[in-house]
Amino acid sequence: MSAPNDLDAFFMPFTASRQFKANPRLLTHAKGMYYTAHDGRKIMDGTAGLWCVNAGHGRETITQAIAAQLNQLDYAPALQVAHPKAFELANRLVAMTPEPLQHAFFTNSGSESADTALKIARAYHQARGEHERTVLIGRARGYHGVNFGGISAGGIANNRAAFGPLLGDSDHLCDTHDLALNGFSRGQPKAGGLAMADDLLRLIDIYGGHRIAAVMVEPVAGSTGVLVPPEGYLQRLREICDAHGILLIFDEVITGFGRLGTSFASDYFSVTPDIMALAKGLTSATYPLGAVMVTREIHDAFMHGPEHIIEFFHGYTYSGHPVACAAALATLDIYQNEALFAHAASLSQQWEDGLHSLADCPHVIDVRNIGLMGAVELQPIDQAPVKRAFDAYLRAYDKGFLIRTTGDIIALSPPLIIEPDEISQLFQCLRDVLHEID
Ligand SMILES: Cc1ncc(COP(=O)(O)O)c(C=O)c1O
């Protein structure tokens, strides 16, 4: 297939679009670990799309489930009526997530899951009569999608800069990245975790613990460039939240569904949140779907008043879309039948070794990893931040590998079906690229 001859109309998301339109990179097919580009070249997917194609591309059982669902029931509203697969999927998710999470609310994306989680947190406190608890705490460098709640709690400057004023009553913990303390850590960094989590005490001093509704963090920060929490950090956050009646929200949009070799990061770190935001791997990106898991206590706080009155004034036209639910159920079957999370866990040592073998390459100032996530941070070019990593991105693409860059950080997160020889090829490509770029 040739490239379309006019690229002008599409206003592209998060893209250097003038560079792109001058030199387009169009993907036309995908199967397993590989895309096919419009010029016929095979491109290895080093990023599982956008951290989401966990089951690999072109999975026939998911395609069949989607087609069958479209034929049987293409759509049913989720307001005041429903369809069986939404309940089936909610039950599957409850069974899979940590025990305290007992209810699922459906959205269509990670951004909607993040905003829904924040709204549930505030509304829960309102429902219990704690009207003062409205402050939402995120973290510097956090990414929770692009809607107003998510960018207010999020801490990536460029994602916030043009859109103010943002949500009032929101603030940020310090991030967990300290190169001097924890550079080139393998897996979880050892140092500083408790002190970093204690930054929440600073915010409690400012706002009062009784005014903070929730703390929302990614267990491992993904989009900002894979920041792995130091040992003890998440446990300490949990303790402080508990001591002050603050809800802890884990945004597991990236870390959910096997990315760390466990079902969820909550399992990996043995820390259970009160609310968990999900999307991406839930359908292996075959169909847009997100979910917000909450405890029974949170859910039940809404269940009072006259029975003909709506309890929670929030939802989307496509909440629990039947086709999305069918896609998710088929995806969860693949994860289970192929033991894909265990497969990811079994490869994480090779992943770590391969990634850290790049430490001696030119420009590299940090390497970090956990599960099948990894990052190589480059020294930015003076006066031209981002350029070096973008050059690496373009060169890797020319060599047939799709990687991802954020600032001057290369981020990697392959589909969980990756095999050992493909991991070796990916890192060999990066080694070559790092030696070639200026
Ligand atoms: C942690 C996290 N939350 C939310 C989102 C937003 O998801 P979406 O792009 O589906 O809205 C992302 C996307 O990368 C994410 O990484």
Image (cartoon, rainbow, N blue to C red):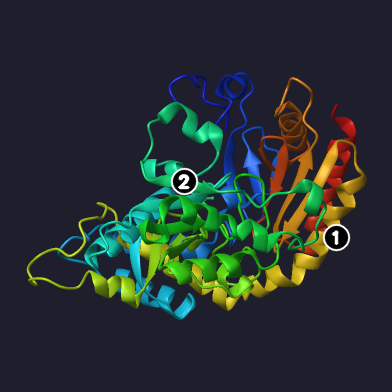
Looking at numbered disc 1 in the image, what kind of residue is underneath it? Asp
Say which quarter of the image contains residue 17: top right
In the rendered structure, the answer to whether residue 427 lies left or right of residue 383 reads: right
- The residue lying toward the viewer, choosing from 73 and 212, is 212
Q: Determine whether, in the image, residue 410 is placed left or right of residue 198.
A: right
Q: Quadrant of the N terminus?
A: top right
Q: Could you tell me the amino acid type at mark 2?
A: Asp
Residue shown at 55% from the left, 34% from the top: 157
346 to 77, vertically: above or below: below
Q: Position of residue 119 (x, y in %)?
A: 32, 55
Q: Is residue 85 above or below residue 19?
A: below
**Disc 2 to disc 1, C-alpha distance:** 37 Å
Q: Secondary structure at mark 2?
A: strand
Which numbered disc flags the more N-terminal residue, 2 or 1?
A: 2
Q: Which residue is mark 2?
A: 171
**34 left or right, relative to 131:** right
- Residue beneath disc 1: 353
User: What residue appears at the point 70 percent right and 38 percent down from the top-left corner?
Assistant: 41
Crowd class of label 1 (few under 14; some 14 to 19; many from 20; radius 10 Å): few
User: Whole-percent x and y of residue 372?
Assistant: 70, 60
